[in-house]
Image (cartoon, rainbow, N blue to C red):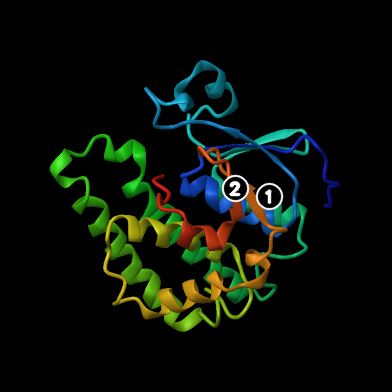
Amino acid sequence: MMHKQNNETILYSYWRSSCSWRVRIALNFKEVSYEIRPIDIVKGNGEQHSDEFSQINPMKKVPALHIDNLTLIESMNILEYLEETRPNPRLMPTDPVKRARAREICEVIVSGIQPLQNVSLLKHIEDKRKREWPKYWITRGFTAVEKLLSSSAGKYCVGDEITLADCCLVPQIYNARRFNVNLEPFPTILKVDHHLENHPKYKSGDHCRKLPTVTAVARSEFSLKFRYKSPPIN
């Protein structure tokens, strides 16, 4: 089922949210034009808890994507919808085994790592453990990801084509650096990261997003992670 692009695609996003970031990567990769509606998840009690936003996403989290006259929540659900409705360029392999490998890498990151170091959970961790807690869980999760990649990776997470797994890996690597995780034990993750950094499509000015920062700089998704000082925190 194909959909024509329209001017009503709106991404409710926080600029440092890794869940939002993976969706932005996919939207940019598929060349979908969209408007960002920033939701500040750290200011005050968090704008995601407002009555207005809870009507958009009852879970009171980012991202939410309004597209094709419907509103979708949960990043993996959004990514799968984009892949199913806009299959070119594709972000999932055609081979069913490779598709399964991509999905399991996504699940390890999305379900097994990221939720254990996001903003809402860290608020409930005592201050003296706020650094060690995410560092432990990211290291534990990356140990699994490294093992999976050792049998699936080529240039990227699954072979030599970018998949949804790469969309999920990029923000998580940035989070690992934020919490000073030692990445030396994960050479395959670093190899994939290096190839993603140098992918010409993501170094192109055609695939960029605007950040609601004081300078409002628009930069490439992948090259941004090495130039911007503040990594994603959700």
Q: Quadrant of residue 56?
A: top right
Furthest toward the left, the residue is: 128
Residue 145 picture location, percent across and down: 39, 70
Residue 199 percent coordinates (x, y): 61, 72
| Dot 1 and dot 2 residues touching (CB under 8 Å) | yes
Q: CA distance from mark 1 to mark 2?
A: 6 Å
The answer to whether residue 17 is left or right of residue 216 is left
> Residue at image x 42%, y 26%?
46
Identify which residue is drawn at 50% across, 80% down: 152
Q: Secondary structure at mark 1?
A: helix
What residue does disc 1 label?
A: 81
- Residue at the far top in the pictured view: 51
**Residue 205 position in % (x across, y down):** 69, 59
Q: Amino acid at mark 1?
A: Tyr
Tell me if residue 122 comes above or below residue 198 in the rendering: above
> 10 Å neighbourhood of mark 2: few (<14), some, or many (≥20)?
few
Amino acid type, residue under disc 2 in the picture: Asn
Name the image quarter holding residue 11: top right
Q: What quarter of the picture does the C terminus occupy?
A: top left
Question: Residue 16, how many percent across, how many down?
Answer: 46, 44
Looking at the image, residue 138 sits to the left or right of residue 127; the answer is: right
The answer to whether 164 is drawn above or below residue 51 in the figure is: below
Q: Which residue is mark 2?
A: 77
